[in-house]
Image (cartoon, grey):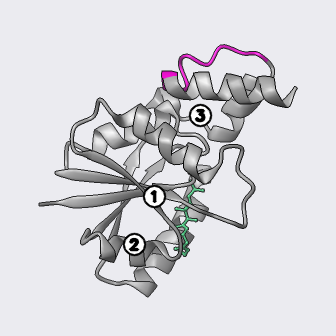
Amino acid sequence: MKKAVFPGSFDPITNGHIDIITRALKLFDQIIVAIAYRKEKKPLFSFKERVELAKKSTSNLPNVIVKPFSGLLVDFVRKERACTIIRGLRTISDFDYEFQMAFMNRKLSPEIETVFFLASEEYAYLSASLVKEVAQMGGNLKDFLPQPVIVALQKKIKKEL
Ligand code: PNS
């Protein structure tokens, strides 16, 4: 079975992520959406919330499972018996960061390949941080986020105000 891991902070999962997962499903039998703990970052959604939102948002996609991870990504990939890391590319500005990560992961684990999927043009401008800003200003989120995430984000913002 061709298994791939799609890692990220997913704070929160967006339609851009769902687009990448859908594309990857055409090439892989199973996609593990791996939610990173990341104690150095201060996420809007807790680790548990990010996992729950990703689960709800992918529940209609076959062969997708959501799992939390902490520590090195390559260790998680090995533990899951996968051999591919999936990342999405939106614009040229993503390249630097993505290349650094891919080369570091290759150095750590040469047997694991990183595969990049190009985001759909309609999501090329989409980022979790921009979406959070739009939400805070009361903008319409339906083109950017899965429904469970819209509900959770609006609730969180109301609480913060
Ligand atoms: O969505 P993000 O924040 O761009 O995802 C980055 C992530 C979580 C994939 C990356 O930071 C990561 O792999 N973290 C795990 C720690 C690790 O393995 N670091 C060394 C390789 S870069």
- Considering the image in quadrants, where does the C terminus appear? top right
- Which-is-in-front pick, marks 3 and 2? 2
Seen in the image, is 155 located left or right of residue 115? right
What is the three-letter code of the residue carrying label 1? Pro
What residue sits 33% from the left and 33% below the top? Answer: 59
Q: Which residue is mark 2?
A: 76
Q: Which mark is residue 126?
A: 3
Report which quarter residue 67 is drawn in: bottom left
For residue 7, the mark is 1
Residue 73, given in percent of the width and then of the height, sits at 46, 71
The amino acid at mark 3 is Leu
- Where is 153 relative to 52, above or below? above
User: Does residue 124 appear left or right of residue 127 in this picture?
Assistant: left
Asked whether the beta carbons under mark 2 and mark 1 sit within 8 Å of each other, the answer is yes
Quadrant placement of the N terminus: bottom left
The residue mark sitting in front, 2 or 1, is 2
Magenta stretch containing residue 113, yes or no?
Answer: no
> Helix, strand, or loop for circle 2?
helix
Q: CA distance from mark 3 to mark 2?
A: 27 Å
